[in-house]
Amino acid sequence: MVIGRRKDGARATVLVAHLGSELYGSDRVLLESVVGLVGGGNRVVVALPSAGPLVAALTTSGARVVICPTPVLRRSVLRPRGMVRLLADTARGLVAGARLIRSIQADVIYVNTVTIPHWVLLARIYRVPVVVHVHEAEESLSKLGQQILTFPLLFATRVVSNSNYTVAVLAAAHHRLSRSTVIYNGIPGPEEVTPSRASLDSTLHLLYIGRLSPRKGLDCVLDAMVELKRRGVSCTLALVGAVFPGYEWYEQQLRAQVTALGLYEQVSFEGFRATIWADLAAADAVVVPSPNESFGNIAVEAILGGRPVITSNAPGLAEATAGYQIAQNFPVGDVEALCRALTWVVDDWPQIAAAAHADIALAQSRHSPTEYHRQVLELVSDMVTK
């Protein structure tokens, strides 16, 4: 049913703004949002700061992609040089964004992150309803930092969050944000689930998928591998992902750490993958050790692929894995607890494999892309017709 219409019957134009052009968690959720909006009959224009693999996927979905200068709030702006760059980028972003809004005559602006607030300002200037879809829960910031980061949300027409935990963090900064709508991410699974190994041999094959970043807790996994090796349990770890531009130093540091720990034959750096299902099929279990996540798409993707997932007990990850038999949490940074969780995978392998079928069905129900498309489409359509 086509419901992306204005009161005059014309197709609605939705301007979608995003902070990047890759294919990590929030990028893939953006793609699902666009698929839902296009499927509802909207004309969708996506503003991205640069070209990247996301562009082809968006174009295939039926959206038009425009490269538009976009200032992004990152921790680097707290330094004097970063602040100067942000001000210059903001000036360019405001001019380019204003030109784009006027040229396409946007009916709604859909901002896919809290870190590009200039779109909210532009929406207010041009009196266009704006929804901000929040994927960040920066609880590690000071109270003042959280209040500053989330202040623009007070001027959004609607705020959508990816988890109850994200709403709680927003509400701690500004109580009014407790009214944010929660829409769980729509997460497609593999076309066909590859069965896990009937039995484990002498080596447990682990998989990490995501950014290579000092904020992702990879040290804990490496230390756990060393400890398990000392106990006679052999593990390999495939790292699928890349660093942010400018963080190449971290990958070099991580490689040096792997070598220093004597794990150079057990840890492989696979780089970024546009599609993860082949890597997941080759793995026995997935590890998500991050000390802070607003949700945890990869944890759900692991379950959709029929693989046990071991995550930290960060609130967003705990929410993402609640109720699944093949998921287990460990206290953030606790190497011994992570070792116990990985040993659970080895010791309870037959039971885990048997429980995977029910968990796959549950994850498909909770994160149905079709249901996600419907919720996003209804939200935006309601804003168009008011």
Image (cartoon, rainbow, N blue to C red):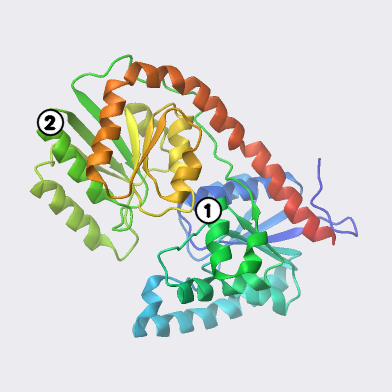
Label 2 sits on a secondary structure element that is: loop
| Disc number for residue 21 | none
For this view, does 231 lie left or right of residue 35? left
Q: Classify 10 Å Cα crowding around label 2: few (below 14), some (14-19), many (20 and above).
A: few
Determine whether, in the image, residue 329 is placed left or right of residue 137. left
Q: Is residue 238 above or below residue 121?
A: above
Secondary structure found at label 1: helix
Q: Between residue 69 and residue 259, name the one nearer to us.
A: 259
Identified at 85% across, 57% down, the residue is: 10
The type of residue carrying mark 2 is Arg
The quadrant of the rendering that contains the C terminus is: bottom right
Q: What residue does disc 2 label?
A: 231
- Where is residue 309? Give x, y as percent: 38, 34
Visible residue check, residue 70 = no
Residue wearing tag 1: 165
> In the image, 40: left or right of 202?
right
Q: Identify the residue at image location x=73%, y=63%.
A: 108
Compared with 359, 107 (above or below) is below
- Residue at the image point whose x is 52% and y is 47% from the top: 28
Is residue 119 depicted above or below 342 in this figure? below
